[in-house]
Structure formats: structure tokens, C-alpha cells
Image (cartoon, helix red, strand yellow):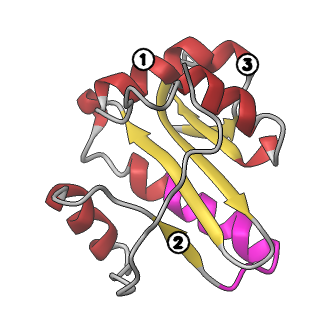
């Protein structure tokens, strides 16, 4: 797998990947999420592609000057277990360390034990914090 920055031509394959991985929710328009990311640190929106440039994986990485974040980490169901998610997280961590980021945060939906096990295997642990959110712009 080659890891490269997202290109706008990747939009539909990435949305299809997120849908296949169960990451899309009715209250988040994935195309709007992509458009928003392309306005902030677009070089940190990563895709993993095969030799034919087909999208196999994605990760939205960001750094706000205090903490790094990873959202939309996804690996095509047919390629899961091959180390692609691990490779994307390693690249995300490298990019964040290069920017001086001291800590990476991510959120996992409650009950998603398989994903929690994946991150634990990479050295991540629960912080004991409760995540709060407030929708400022509705994706309708």
C-alpha cells in the first residue's frame, strides 16, 4: 500500500469506503466532512492506495497546537488484518511528531470492542475523559 495525501478525485471511493466500514452517520454528510477537511491541513488527509491507485484505506489527521486527532480511520473490509490500519496510524503519528505534537487523541464509538482492541494493540489506552459534542452546523 502506498500512503499519499487525499486528492479530490478520491472523494467517491473514500465515501464508499467509509460506508462499507460503517463510519457514515445520518447527521454527518461525508462529502461535507471531506470539503471541510480540505480547508484545514489538507496534506494530513491520507489515503492508502494499491498499485492501481484504488483507495483501500483513509485517515483524517489534524493538529490544533495542543493535541493531534485521527478521524475516519478506515480500511476496506477485504483488506482488514493486513496491517494497513497500522501503517496509516504509524504515518499519522510520524506526521504529528514532526509538527511537535505531544499527544494523539481519537474517539471510538461506545461498544466498538473490535476497534478498541486494534488501538490497544498499538499502545493506546482509555484516558478516562468523557467526550462531549455540540453540533454547530447541521449537515442537512
**SS class of the residue under badge 1?**
helix
Name the residue: 35% across, 87% down. Answer: 128
Q: Residue under label 1, please give it.
A: 16
Name the residue: 56% across, 26% down. Answer: 139
Q: Residue under label 2, please give it.
A: 105
N-terminal of the pair, mark 1 or mark 3, is 3
- Location of residue 124 with respect to 85 vertically, above or below: below
Q: Are marks 2 and 3 in contact (CB under 8 Å)?
A: no
Q: State how far apart marks 2 and 1 are (Cα).
A: 25 Å
Q: Are marks 1 and 3 in contact (CB under 8 Å)?
A: no
- Main secondary structure along the magenta-highlighted residues: helix
Label 2 crowd bin: few (<14), some (14–19), many (20+), radius 10 Å: some
Q: Which mark is residue 73?
A: none
Label 3 crowd bin: few (<14), some (14–19), many (20+), radius 10 Å: few
Name the residue: 64% across, 42% down. Answer: 46
Q: Quadrant of residue 52?
A: top right
Task: Tell me where the magenta segment starts and ends, as one range.
Answer: 88-102
Q: Residue under label 3, please give it.
A: 8
**SS class of the residue under badge 3?**
helix
Given residues 87 and 128, the one toward you in this image is 128
Q: Position of residue 88 (x, y in %)?
A: 52, 52
Q: Is residue 124 left or right of residue 101?
A: left
Q: State how far apart marks 2 and 3 are (Cα).
A: 26 Å
Q: Is residue 80 left or right of residue 34?
A: left
- For the image, the number of numbered tags is 3
Viewer-nearest of discs 2 and 3? 2
**Is residue 89 located in the magenta-colored stretch of the structure?**
yes
Name the residue: 65% across, 69% down. Answer: 68
Q: Position of residue 101 (x, y in %)?
A: 73, 79
Q: Are marks 2 and 1 in contact (CB under 8 Å)?
A: no
Amino acid at each position: 500500500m502506498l500512503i499519499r495525501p487525499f486528492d479530490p478525485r478520491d472523494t467517491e471511493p473514500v465515501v464508499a469506503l467509509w460506508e462499507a466500514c460503517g463510519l457514515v452517520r445520518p447527521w454527518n454528510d461525508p462529502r461535507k466532512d471531506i470539503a471541510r477537511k480540505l480547508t484545514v491541513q489538507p496534506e494530513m488527509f491520507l489515503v492508502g492506495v494499491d498499485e492501481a491507485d484504488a483507495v483501500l484505506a483513509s485517515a483524517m489527521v489534524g493538529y490544533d497546537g495542543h493535541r493531534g486527532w485521527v478521524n475516519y480511520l478506515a480500511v476496506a473490509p477485504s483488506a482488514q488484518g493486513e496491517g494497513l490500519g497500522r501503517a496509516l496510524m504509524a504515518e499519522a503519528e510520524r506526521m504529528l511528531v514532526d509538527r511537535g505534537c505531544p499527544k494523539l487523541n481519537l474517539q471510538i464509538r461506545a461498544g466498538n470492542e473490535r476497534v478498541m482492541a486494534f488501538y490497544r494493540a498499538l499502545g493506546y489506552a482509555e484516558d478516562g475523559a468523557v467526550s462531549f459534542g455540540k453540533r454547530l452546523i447541521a449537515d442537512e
